């Protein structure tokens, strides 16, 4: 399958994941909304859909909104492949090499499934911008909690294919990446609000990597 086909299959499967998450975590949403809780509470889980798609997800709860960050994963002879979906912008893909670089930096003694779990729980939010890096065409740089992802925008497939990972210390040596990290820090304040999104948001990089805003109570009522 091409990356576009993988993304399409995951998007079609997303309704199964949302239905599961709604039933599993609606009480947490109600608790946070009615408890006047300050800040954001985060939890993570996993799910295998009736069609066999494997998911890791992160849920971020605040008194104002609930956001889900869904990431599908699959494996073959090369290793584990990851693809995160977001409401705006392209899907983002990481091949086995990228996940292994992350594991070597942060969880060297862990197996790859543990590294997968830790990666998504810590790095579900991404701030992305185009960057000129080693003359790669259509280069996209993304700042995440534990470092940086660098890859290329595949326009025909509407997928960012990451080809490497740098930890924070490595990325600090590249001036352009330091600027992306500032965007990530700013985004954390931005994410506390619920801005009105304009049409054509797929080209507004600030909206990329922000998951899906959902209401679990509404999903349960619709089920």
Image (cartoon, rainbow, N blue to C red):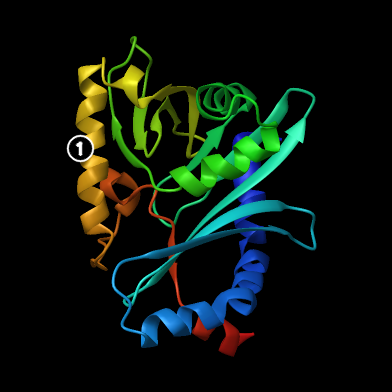
Quadrant housing the N terminus:
top right
CA neighbours of label 1 inside 10 A, class few (<14), some (14 to 19), many (20+): few
Which is more toward the observer, 122 or 157? Answer: 122
List x then y, in percent, for residue 54: 71, 51
Q: Provide the secondary structure element on which disc 1 rests.
A: helix
Q: Which residue is mark 1?
A: 182
Which is more toward the observer, 3 or 21? Answer: 21
Q: Tell which residue pokes out farthest to the top in this image.
A: 134
Q: Quadrant of residue 82?
A: top right
Quadrant housing the C terminus:
bottom right
Residue displayed at 80% across by 24% down = 77
List x then y, in percent, for residue 34: 38, 88
Q: Quadrant of residue 26?
A: bottom right
Is 111 rendered above or below residue 126?
A: above
Q: How many marks?
A: 1
List x then y, in percent, for residue 24: 63, 75
Q: Is residue 21 left or right of residue 210?
A: right
Is 42 rendered above or below residue 19?
A: above
Is 41 rendered above or below residue 108?
A: below
Q: Is residue 70 left or right of residue 213?
A: right
List x then y, in percent, for residue 147: 38, 30
Q: Is residue 93 left or right of residue 166?
A: right
């Amino acid at each position: 399958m091409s990356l576009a086909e993988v993304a399409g299959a995951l998007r079609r499967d997303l309704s199964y994941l949302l239905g599961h998450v709604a039933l599993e975590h609606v009480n947490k949403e109600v608790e946070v909304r009615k408890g006047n809780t300050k800040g954001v509470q985060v939890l993570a889980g996993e799910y295998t859909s009736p069609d066999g798609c494997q998911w890791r997800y992160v849920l971020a709860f605040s008194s104002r909104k609930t956001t889900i960050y869904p990431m599908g994963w699959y494996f073959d002879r090369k290793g584990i492949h990851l693809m995160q979906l977001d409401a705006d912008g392209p899907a983002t893909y990481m091949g086995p090499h990228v996940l292994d670089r992350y594991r070597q930096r942060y969880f060297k003694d862990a197996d790859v499934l543990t590294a997968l779990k830790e990666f998504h729980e810590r790095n579900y939010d991404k701030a992305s911008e185009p960057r000129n890096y080693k003359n790669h065409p259509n280069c996209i740089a993304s700042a995440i909690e534990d470092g940086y992802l660098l890859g290329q925008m595949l326009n025909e497939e509407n997928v960012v294919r990451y080809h490497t990972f740098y930890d924070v210390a490595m990325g600090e040596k590249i001036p352009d990446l330091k600027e992306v990290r500032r965007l990530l820090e700013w985004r954390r304040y931005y994410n506390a609000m619920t801005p009105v999104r304009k049409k054509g948001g797929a080209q507004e990089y600030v909206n990329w990597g922000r998951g899906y805003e959902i209401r679990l109570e509404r999903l349960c009522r619709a089920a």
